[in-house]
Amino acid sequence: MTLVWTKTYVTLVYSRPTMKVWIIFLLCLAGQAFAASVTGEEPIADELVVEEEELNLEDALEEIVPEGGNPVQVETGEFDDVIEIVEEDVNAENPCLNHHCKKGKVCEVDEENIPMCVCQDPTSCPESVGEYENVCATDNTTYDSSCHFFAHKCSLEGTKKGHKLHLDYIGPCKFIEPCLDAELTEFPLRMRDWLKNVLVTLYERDEENNLLTEKQKLRVKKIYENEKRLQAGDHSLDLLAHDFEKNYNMYIFPVHWQFGQLDQHPSDRFLSHTELSPLRAPLIPMEHCTTRFFEQCDSDNDKYIALEEWAKCFGIKDQDVDQDLVI
Ligand SMILES: *[C@@H]1O[C@H](CO)[C@@H](O)[C@H](O)[C@H]1NC(C)=O
Ligand SMILES: [Ca+2]
Ligand SMILES: [Ca+2]
């Protein structure tokens, strides 16, 4: 199952400028390592290269990482409610040329040649060529592609059903084992370790100073240079738990950092379902505790994960939650 994660990021590699490639590649490896510790599979780096040609996850990914988005600073976009951007271009003969519509809609002109966004006919979506293009929605229905999903969601616009319908995860709907209490406690252990390793790896590869900001680098430097740091590897849960206790301080920043990467639409210290998706959607098929973990993170049940809630579910103490670390 680690492949899903791999594919997701490999596609990104080929649709972004080269500097971004590294980030994705690294995330990819890290993601594999994270997922592999559940499945018992060894991370296989070769897959990264092999899979590239078969992939056409663009649509699905657009909502995970929109165009030009730094996959680490994942820009989630309101993929259910993207603001329609209308650019005037006097030279354009086709009024639809620069008229952007949100996902699920396409531009058409009315009798007066005024462009407008209308729901896309699902049959006009490119035919999906493989299961990896499928997406599973929150109603446990598989859609051929995210295009098909958003076209359908558009047709429900204004209804309660439509409002509640979201893209849940990448891939066809499948039976996802219930997450047991004991397994749920493992999730943050591995996730924290993974976040820390992603950051350290970004730091190591940051030759051109593009992967992390100066402020972020200062924070990661301390972790990187700490001799007591637990090196990346396939560690037992006992060791991870022990390390979290012993080297607790090293985990504070990575947890804040990930929150900041997701909290961009808007950056209000709350994560919406949409903002969380770039992390959730590729993870769910591999990590059966993902949904339950993030559900229980929202301890006040308001459908948003506040910074305090986020930090708490990763085991960060109240007194260590710091807005200024979300950089
Ligand atoms: C969702 O659909 C899959 C495949 O059709 C099925 O195996 C699974 O049990 C369903 N899950 C739920 C929660 O209904
Ligand atoms: Ca937000
Ligand atoms: Ca909440």
Image (tube, grey):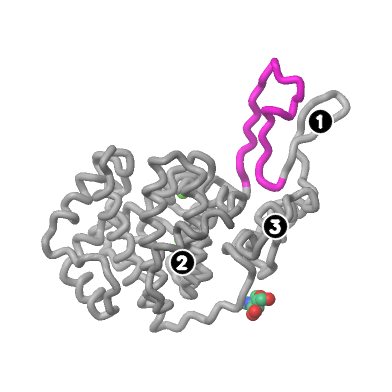
Between disc 3 and disc 1, the foreground one is 3
Highlighted range, magenta: 81-104
- Please report the residue visible at 36 percent of the width from the left and 77 percent of the height from the top: 185
Q: Earlier in the sequence, mark 3 or mark 2?
A: 3
Which residue is situated farthest in the left direction here? 227
Q: Residue 158: tell me if it is visible.
A: no
Q: In the rendered image, which quarter is residue 33 located in?
A: bottom left
Whether residue 288 is in magenta: the answer is no
Q: In the rendered image, which quarter is residue 134 located in?
A: bottom right
Disc 2 on helix, strand or loop? helix
Establish if 325 lies above or below 84.
below
Residue 128 - label: 3
Q: Amino acid at mark 2?
A: Phe
Residue identifier under label 2: 294
Of 250 and 98, nearer the camera is: 98
Q: In the rendered image, which quarter is residue 132 located in?
A: bottom right
